[in-house]
Amino acid sequence: VQANPPFLRLLAEMRNAVRNPQPGKSIVYWMRMGDLRIVDNRALAAASKQAVQDKIPLIVLFLLSPQDCLAHDMSKQRIDFVLRNLSEIKESLGGLNIPLFTVSHTPRHTVPLKVVSLLESFQCTRLFANIEYEVDELRRDLKVLALSKEKGVRPHYFHDRCIIEPGLIKTKDGRAHAVYSPYQKKWIAMLNESIDTYLEESPIPDANSSSIRQDSTFGPLCNTPLPHSVEGFELDPADRETMVKVWPAGSAVAQEILSRFLKTKARSSQLGTTDPLADGAEISNKKSRILMYAEKRDSGNQDTTSRLSPYLAAGVISPRECIRATMSLAGLKKVDAGRTTGIGRWVQELAWRDFYTNVLANFPRVSMGRPYQEKLANVRWEVNEEHLAAWKQGKTGIPIVDAAMRQLNTMGWMHNRMRMIVAMFLTKDLLLDWHLGEQYFMEQLIDGDLASNNGGWQWSASTGVDPAPYFRIFNPYTQSAKADPTGDYIRTYVPELKNLRGPELHNPPMKVADKLGYPRPIVVHAEVRERAIRRYQNPGQE
Ligand code: FAD
């Protein structure tokens, strides 16, 4: 069903928004969980420009709704990361004399009322925000739009999350694409045709004309303290320390990580404790990670990928900036998205991010518990709490699966190939419902993103757009040898196996496993593979 998805309704409703807002005393930019930066931020730049033009101050509002965090299964790691980034933003905005006003609000269904009452108290004339494409958030924004009309406030919503906004790339008959390659072909053609428009860098907010004096009506807002944590989402101090080290906050850090990805070699040691900025990896454009990306991206035993996903998911860096940086590295005026070059392959990953957001926006049912392939809605899943717990804890007895799940549990992040391996293992080998995996990932990931996570899970479960065919089931042992050829990845996260080498490491004989106190495999791959094929062939029956 593709009838009038909520993001199109929001865009249509904007045409009916208040034309001439009431005269007032402020402009408000509502910063959301996914746009945590002041650099290259479309709504913020537009809000600042308006404030300068109207000669009234700009206020940045951040509203935290613990119930929203709960409803989206947001991880403690992600919320902590949001708060750490907010603290950096507060400081940067402070330097520009722009206040960041943070408020926590519950229950979630009254968020629109709360926002509009805040707008009233700020005597706001116009509200600026970047669009969030998740269904609940779009419905919330539609309510805000209706309520602001009553108050004479004009809302302005912007597309900022993607390089090419949802809704623009369509099939010949005007529908949204459900297959990646034709989408990607149009994506690159459209981008290169209007490159200046799509990649235009938005200026940082103006420092002078819209600034607030400390003694003005809104001066006290500059001093509102930021929360250190959200009730129910507090991280253990040790976990927080790891997160601060592995995923430092701030746009400057994100830019540094991008630059190191473009200019430095991959490292293989100490994967578990890697501080993305520590280590003096040799600077060499010839061998930099992005240039080796096409060949090396699936190697979990080295940090061959950018590790920018937490920063992209929280909007600490803009995807446009990532693309611009690849163009300047290649010295090209057009974007390379070819499959053979490292730069091209990496750009394609950013296109996957746009693709899944486009899918979420156009087929919102995929994020509301439905499979994209409705014919697979009633696959009969196993119910096995022990298997689910073993998978979550990294105790399945299959080393690559266990290493990956333990990486997730310690770092709040997992390598892409490993995500595919563990997701395929849960849905095909264990035949457990993909929703359980999708939820557990969101609860643990620092880069949790509804569109990409749902897309990745439905790909692995063969229920999504452009999915893995249900009969092409990964063999975790052969995947292990390919994705971790040196064994460093498994040895880092599964210390019980740290003295094993070669094939024994990927599939330890029972006697060896018993001696090392490592579990025996909870299922036999060859047997359960057949079971999965039978179930998918006859959904609903055994
Ligand atoms: P790189 O390889 O450097 O790629 C650059 C960027 O492109 C990433 O940061 C990410 O923003 C984007 N990207 C890369 N691969 C994909 C992809 N397959 N789909 C969409 N975007 C992609 N990614 C998330 O950001 N959040 C999630 O919650 C998430 N859940 C996933 C769940 C499953 C089951 C699977 C198979 C994949 C999931 N991914 C998710 C996609 C991918 O695994 C991560 O984006 C990637 O591992 C992040 O590492 P990186 O930043 O080093 O990526």
Image (cartoon, rainbow, N blue to C red):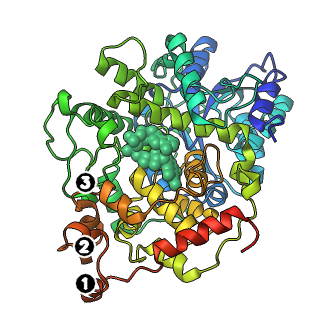
Task: State yes or no: discs 2 and 3 in contact (Cβ < 8 Å).
Answer: no
Q: 376 left or right of 104?
A: right
- The amino acid type found where label 2 is placed reads Glu
For disc 3, the neighbor class at 10 Å (few under 14, some 14 to 19, many from 20) is: some
Quarter of the image for residue 74 reads bottom right
User: Separation of disc 3 and disc 1 at Cα?
Assistant: 30 Å
**Residue 390 in view here:** yes
Identify residue for label 1: 512
Labels 2 and 3: the sequence-earlier one = 3
Task: State yes or no: discs 2 and 1 in contact (Cβ < 8 Å).
Answer: yes
Labels 3 and 1: the sequence-earlier one = 3
Image coordinates for residue 182, horizontal then vertical, percent = 60, 28
Q: 417 left or right of 149?
A: left
User: Separation of disc 2 and disc 1 at Cα?
Assistant: 8 Å
Quarter of the image for residue 407 reads bottom left
Task: Say what secondary structure mark 3 lies in.
Answer: loop
Q: Residue at x 45, y 59 (%)?
A: 421
For disc 2, the neighbor class at 10 Å (few under 14, some 14 to 19, many from 20) is: few
Is the CB atom of the residue marked by disc 3 within 8 angstroms of ligand 1's nearest atom?
A: no
- The amino acid type found where label 1 is placed reads Val
**Mark number, residue 504:** 2
**Mark number, residue 274:** 3
